[in-house]
Amino acid sequence: MRADLDIIQEWIPAGSRVLDLGCGNGELLAWLRDHKRVSGYGLEIDPDNLTECVRKGINVIEQDLNKGLGNFASNSFDVVVMTQALQAVTYPDRILDEMLRVGRQCIITFPNFGHWRCRWYLASKGKMPVSEFLPYTWYNTPNIHFCTFKDFEALCHERQAQVLDRLAVDHQHRHNWASKLWPNLLGEIGIYRVSSPGFAQHKVAV
Amino acid sequence: MSKVFAEDSVGIVTPQIAHFSEPLALACGRAIAEYDLVYETYGTLNASASNAVLICHALSGHHHAAGYHSETDRKPGWWDSCIGPGKPIDTRRFFVVSLNNLGGCNGSTGPSSIDPDTGQPFGAQFPVLTVEDWVHSQALLADHLGIPVWAAVVGGSLGGMQALQWALTYPERVRHCVAIASAPKLSAQNIAFNEVARQAILSDPEFHGGNFQAEGVIPKRGLMLARMVGHITYLSDDSMGEKFGRGLKSEKLNYDFHSVEFQVESYLRYQGEEFSGRFDANTYLLMTKALDYFDPAAAYGDDLAKTFENVKANFCIMSFTTDWRFSPARSRELVNALMAARKNVCYLEIDAPQGHDAFLIPVPRYLQGFSSYMNRIEI
């Protein structure tokens, strides 16, 4: 399984109900179903991924995250997961609100634009960073809303969402004492577990 | 020399007739004393009868879904794009049953059949049927064929409604329900189109209150109009534009009302003409009523999620982006209710330009998704 998914699965209780936003080829949901009796649904729009999910027997729903989660009731899932999609949606703040409303807990992973390599690239070359991990040019990228760990945590704070767990890892999803000490500088990917008990009362629809 | 069919065709098929002599009680309060259902089968039923798939047809469909009746047949069955060896409903794995619904006009007992009590065609005396009535009669056909549980019940449009009704009425007898380009009930607009079609038939002087057969005529004009208005709703604006645009039959305009001037007029007239020659007007009325009446959530206070509470089937729902007859929003109502009821469901919203008719057309992504779902069904 993809390394970040392997970290995430540990945060998902056995037997829980999970909504996976941008579930890709259904790897996480299939693993959770087979190993932790987890049920739930995955949202996806890529045709090949959809087909792969159907093949795996995943409950996959063709639905665009940019149209919101208005079709899901508040607090209807134990965990809402969104891996590597926050930076690609049109309104990251609204989707975060929606996740907090629909799920009792949310797990979100995203690339950290505050990583030292990004900072160094921008500082030394004066150009938008292009790397093996983020190989797109600025004009041709699905990633339209980059942020740093600090930015994300500020958004969580503003929305009164509580950060329950945080892990800063490198692009191979390893973590060590240094990335724990200076996550915003040394972490390439952030894996966050957040919740907002008050959010279920909000009637948010993107 | 015998004709060679394509490798993915089921080849020559022969319709069969099942006769039922026990009366069937109907939703309208009446009963049919005895009746025939005509059906075709493709593939082989396995020893444990675990590989059977039921095909439910739409408004003007029938039992001949795949293959050819003879070597000289020009066209295969109506869903040949999806049924056959290596096709989404793979006849190497599945035993496929396709019937003509009760009330039909292709061999099953319907308004044009002879009423044994009178020796005359039923005509207007034939009872109005509902989707539930059809499902009951299909269950009796399943008994007749020795099929306790369907691996899948599959249908598009009105056929999808029957597949949904199966999952609701016989939760223990359906493992997978595949409803394509369907809806949980008709909208006011849908009913309005049906009403225009019905009025076209009812107001045809040749209709004779439904007893036209006894008069030796058919309400050809009415049927033609009904089919023409129906056909418009099966196509998308884009696909009509693409196919006909404003193309003319001749070089110039005639400035009269009699000539067939635009290509699209010629096409619709041809469709109407062809249809009026092969379809029974009373059956058409009956089918549109069954569509209008379908509303399983009505018994549950319009709560569709509650309606699905006791179903056991896994669901595959598919819709097409340019379908405005049963738009993707209608399929999403089904999907949202199924998710709220915590049922297993896959939903694919296929980007296709062909409108409602797309479910009959071999759109690559549709076939791919359909195949993936059917292939994962255990037999």
Image: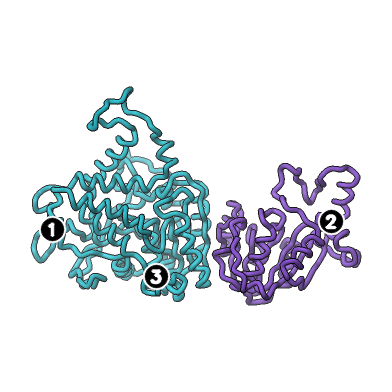
Chain colours: A purple, B cyan
Circle 1 — which element? loop
Which residue is more in the foreground, B2 or B335?
A: B335
Residue B263 position (above or below residue A80): above
Is disc 3 on the same chain as disc 2?
Answer: no
Q: Which of marks 1 and 3 is nearer the N terminus?
A: 1
Q: In the structure shown, which secondary structural element does the residue marked by tag 2 occupy? A: loop
For discs 1 and 3, the disc positioned in front in the rendered view: 3
Marks 1 and 3: same chain?
A: yes
Q: Where is residue B129 in the image (x, y as percent from the top left)?
A: 26, 64
Q: Which residue is drawn at 43% across and 36% down?
A: B242
Residue A4 lies, in percent from the top left, at 75, 63
The Cα–Cα distance between marks 1 and 3, rounded to whole angstroms, is: 35 Å
Give the CA distance from mark 2 to mark 3: 52 Å
Q: Residue at x 22, y 65 (%)?
A: B19
Q: How crowded is mark 1: few (under 14 residues within 10 Å), some or many (20 or more)?
A: some
Please give the residue where the numbered disc 3 appears in the rendered image.
Answer: B297
- Dot 1 corresponds to which residue? B121
* Amino acid bearing label 1: Pro
Q: Is residue B83 left or right of residue A37?
A: left
Point 24% across, 29% down: residue: B256
B105 vs B267: above or below: below
Image coords of residue B12 (percent x, y) = 33, 48
**Can residue B56 be seen by looking at this rendering?**
yes
Chain ID for label 2? A
Task: Tell me the number on the disc at residue A114.
Answer: 2
